[in-house]
Amino acid sequence: MAGTSWRMRRLALWGMGMWPMRADLAQLATALYAKTYSADSTSMPEISNSIHRQALTLFSASESIKEQKFIIERKKSSLSGAGVGVFMTKGSATPGTLLGFYPGDVYREKAVLTGTSLEYTAVWKDGVMDGHPSLETVIKASSACSYSLGNLINHPSESFLPNSVFYPFEFPRSMFERYGHLIPSRSRDANEWPVPGQAVVAIRDISQGEELFVDYDFSTETTLECSAWYTPVSREDKMMIADELFDRVYGSQISS
């Protein structure tokens, strides 16, 4: 099957009944390829279920240093002129690992953020999150949970590849009842459950000392506005990362 696209290989494998053991990674690869990130958790249930399970572990570990398998911290970015960045300062992570969350206030109406710096907003299908560092929600979240640093993760320069992705995730009421003081999302729409949020998920292997990078995937109009520092990640690089995920899912099941 060498030389064929990963999509064709996936369809061929599924046709032979070879279902992936890591369905969440298979769905993540599909989402990366098709850019089908959605606030509707039913569209990619395996990813959402995986994030939910890991979130409970992450929140529990954040209250005990001994339980933390990895630590992310803010430090001076390796990118020239970027200021602060987020680094894996202890441990490591593999694709599919929940690294943390994007803290901030969630709005269903995107228009409310007119004039807000694009550097601290996360936009998806049904809303937008304002993660400006000066917001009370962000300050409290960063103090309460060391994994709430998504708003400080930089877009990579041409010298780096993205190793993480922002993925829409909904915090259920039951999670708030147990870990409400650690959850970094606050909905500005009264009595809304579940509360929308953004998870930070690894899409490549991340070693100790590495900086986290997320492809901001700006629109053409926004790209022009931020041309001084923003360089789009090439389609070839995106396909390579998706292919790596696909090969990780099926590598032990079939030879290339």
Image: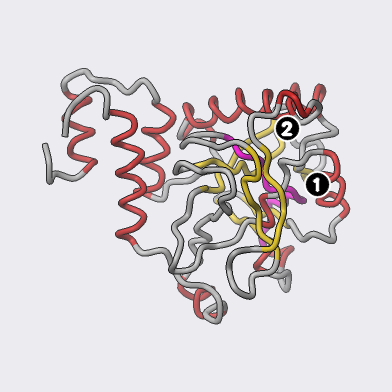
Q: Note whether 93 is above or below 102 in the view shown.
A: above
Give the magenta-colored segment's residue range: 98-110
Q: Type of residue at label 1?
A: Ser
Question: In the shown orientation, is residue 187 left or right of residue 90?
Answer: right
Q: Note whether 226 is above or below 149 in the view shown.
A: below
Q: Secondary structure at mark 2?
A: loop
Task: Name the one closer to the observer, 170 or 57.
Answer: 57
Which quarter of the figure is the C terminus placed in? Answer: top left
Task: Name the one closer to the observer, 184 or 149.
Answer: 149
Q: Where residue 140 sits in the image (x, y, percent)?
A: 87, 46
Q: Note whether 131 is above or below 188 in the view shown.
A: below
Pointer 2: what residue?
A: 193
Q: Residues within 10 Å of mark 1 (few under 14, many from 20)?
A: many
| Residue 214 located within the stretch drawn in magenta | no
Task: Name the one closer to the observer, 30 or 230.
Answer: 230
Q: Residues within 10 Å of mark 2 (few under 14, many from 20)?
A: few
Which quarter of the figure is the N terminus placed in? Answer: top left
Total residue callouts: 2
Q: Where residue 154 sits in the image (x, y, percent)?
A: 60, 61
Residue 142, disc: 1
Q: Where residue 87 sits in the image (x, y, percent)?
A: 63, 51
Q: Secondary structure at mark 1?
A: helix
Q: Residue at x 64, y 70 (%)?
A: 82
Of the residues tagged 1 and 2, which is closer to the observer?
A: 1
Distance of label 1 from label 2 (alpha carbons):
23 Å
Locate residue 88: give its quadrant. top right
Locate residue 90: give its quadrant. top right
